[in-house]
Image (tube, rainbow, N blue to C red):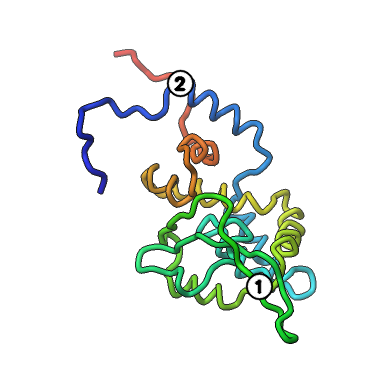
Amino acid sequence: MYPEMTTPRKLEPFGRADYKAIDKQRGNERTKFIKPDVWDKILETVKNEKKGDPEIVPNLLLCYSFGFRINETLGLTKDKFFADFVLVDEQGGNVVDNGGDRELTRVEVKTTERQVPYWNMTAKEAWALVKQIKVMHPHTLTKRVNEVLGGFGHKSHDLRRTFITNAFRSGKHWKDVQRAAGHKDVRTTMAYDQDDRGFRHKKADLDD
């Protein structure tokens, strides 16, 4: 999948200094990974007609499964769905009144456009969710999402962190995860990953 380098070189993208910087950034980040059992509780709550906010369920599921930013779920249209990926190049802009009907305008994403593979659901499943999305201003959507997640100690950007961490846990190549996340620097992607890979700090038995 990845072509060989024209000139031989040692591929070592992360040195000790890089890892120290990443660990430091992890400590300063306010966002965090959403554990599976907590995610189940979030979905149960948000789907509740009285205590939750069922209208934002499609947005939450798309962000969790594709690492979208909240306002990017408002920029998805049918022509963005390709055989192997979803193209993320637009986000929600403003809500305008068009003869009594409220319509959402779309603008280019503020970051680099990206292609996100169908790692967690099919194209048809994702498109079915997009068709359920309600017209609302991006700020309103973000506020509503954060109101629900806040009750569990999380916020909207934690959905991206969780997507990236889960991608690494499932064995995805770091280049693919970086591209799916849309990060120019892989160190940013690595900083989002909160999995310690389960290393034990027990001394190795070296005695014969």
Label 2 residue SS:
helix
Q: Mark 2 points at which residue?
A: 16
Where does the C terminus fall, quadrant-wise?
top left
Q: In which quarter of the image is residue 40?
A: bottom right
Crowding around mark 1 (Cα neighbors within 10 Å: few <14, some 14 to 19, many 20+) is: many
Q: For the view shown, which residue lies furthest in the bottom direction?
A: 99
Name the amino acid type tagged 1: Leu
Numbered label attached to residue 104: 1
Left or right: 7 as drawn, with respect to 32: left
Q: Which residue lies furthest to the top in this view?
A: 207
Label 2 neighbour load within 10 Å: few <14, some 14-19, many 20+: few
Q: What element carries label 1?
A: strand
Residue 199's x, y, as percent?
A: 46, 31
Residue at far right of view: 50
Residue at figure coordinates x 48%, y 54% from the top left: 113
Question: Which is more N-terminal, label 1 or label 2?
Answer: 2
- Please tell me which residue lies in front, 108 or 115: 108
Closest to the observer, 181 or 31: 181
Q: Nearer the viewer, residue 92 or 15?
A: 92
What amino acid does circle 2 point to? Answer: Arg
**Relative image position of residue 162 (x, y in whole percent):** 56, 50
